[in-house]
Amino acid sequence: MQKKVIVAALAAAFASPVPALADSLMLYGKINVDVESVKSDKVAAPATDATSLNRVQSNASRFGFKGSEDLGDGLQVVYQFETQIDTVNDKNAKTPFNGVRNSEIGLKGGFGTIFAGNWDSPYKLAHNKIELFDNTTVFTTNALVGVTGNGKSYVTRQNNVIEYMSPNMGGFSVQAAYSMDSSKTATTNKTTTSVAGMYENDMLYAALAYETRSDQTTAGKSDNATRLVAAFKFPNGLIGATLERMSVANTASTTASQTNSELVGMYGIGKTSLGIAYARNGDYNGVSNTGANQLSLRYGYSFTKATELYAAYTSISNGNATAVYGFNASAASVAPTRAVGAKQSGFGLGLTHTF
């Protein structure tokens, strides 16, 4: 009799419905690896630094999961966790997981989405629609676009951030983010406010973005950046442009400024695609020969929607006064080292797969 009771209890337990952990849960990722050769005609320490090298780059390969749960009355909890993976296993103390990428938890409803976590700034996201080379590679024009003459990059993912994304309103949308300073001191509070307004339809994309950073360069002062991004889309391609104005508070009474610009074009023919981008950073604070220009080219062949073979080339030329722009600082490796007036170039052959 006792055995029958136990068996009946177990059967009832397993027959009971198991509560769902979430209404949706998705695993996803991207692997982007290329074999590349890079060189520079000038390096920071000529006696010891190599002027050229060959390497395999992981290019911010990533893995993550995201999902949502219905809370009722049109409200959802949404979440995402994404980590960068070093598929090359050559850096960061040989650890496979080497950085937290876009990760958050928040609420979504008719009002839009509001969340907290670690996320790309609206200023950065406004440009992503015309990024042809992936923000993390040495070929991206984000080596110049979004970068100031004193080395500050606005192509960033902000931590300690509260961010809002509006719903799509007839093609219009708004994003706003506020990043808090967890290392605030008695004299500095390095907060960041970033906003962007975007419009997109089948033929046009346009965005206006602004970001301000308090105490970034000088205590009690703010650095600012404003960018306009536009693209005309046509079947199998696009033509796009970026224009931005950067302002750096070098001291309490002086402000340096510069203007950056970019033109891009992309066209696909069957399984192949061609891309070209030209970027130029203007002279910093009006001083001659402190700017730089960059040309990047790309060829891609898509085996499927998920898998592409690509070849890419880039060249960066610095002004010979104080300019030290170089390969994108968020790339896994930025060698060769940067030197004033250097001309850097890189060529790579890579393979990407998304899932």
Image (tube, rainbow, N blue to C red):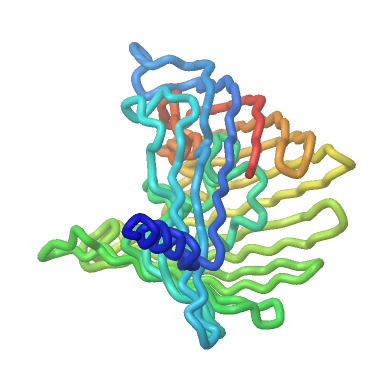
Q: Quadrant of residue 135?
A: top right
Frontmost residue, 210 versus 136: 136
State the residue at coordinates (66%, 82%). Answer: 169
Q: Is residue 58 above or below residue 240?
A: above
Image quadrant where one finds the C terminus? top right
x and y, in percent, of residue 16 in the image: 47, 67
Q: Quadrant of the N terminus?
A: bottom left
Evaluate whether residue 55 shows in this view. Answer: yes
Q: Nearer the viewer, residue 199 or 212?
A: 199
Q: Kindly give the residue lying farthest to the left in the view shown.
A: 186
**Residue appearing at x 31%, y 62% in the figure:** 160
In the depicted view, which residue is nearer to us: 213 or 339? 213
346 sits to left or right of 301: left
Evaluate whether residue 226 shows in this view.
no
Residue situated furthest front in the rendering: 1
Question: Where in the figure is residue 285, as x and y percent of width and height?
Answer: 42, 54
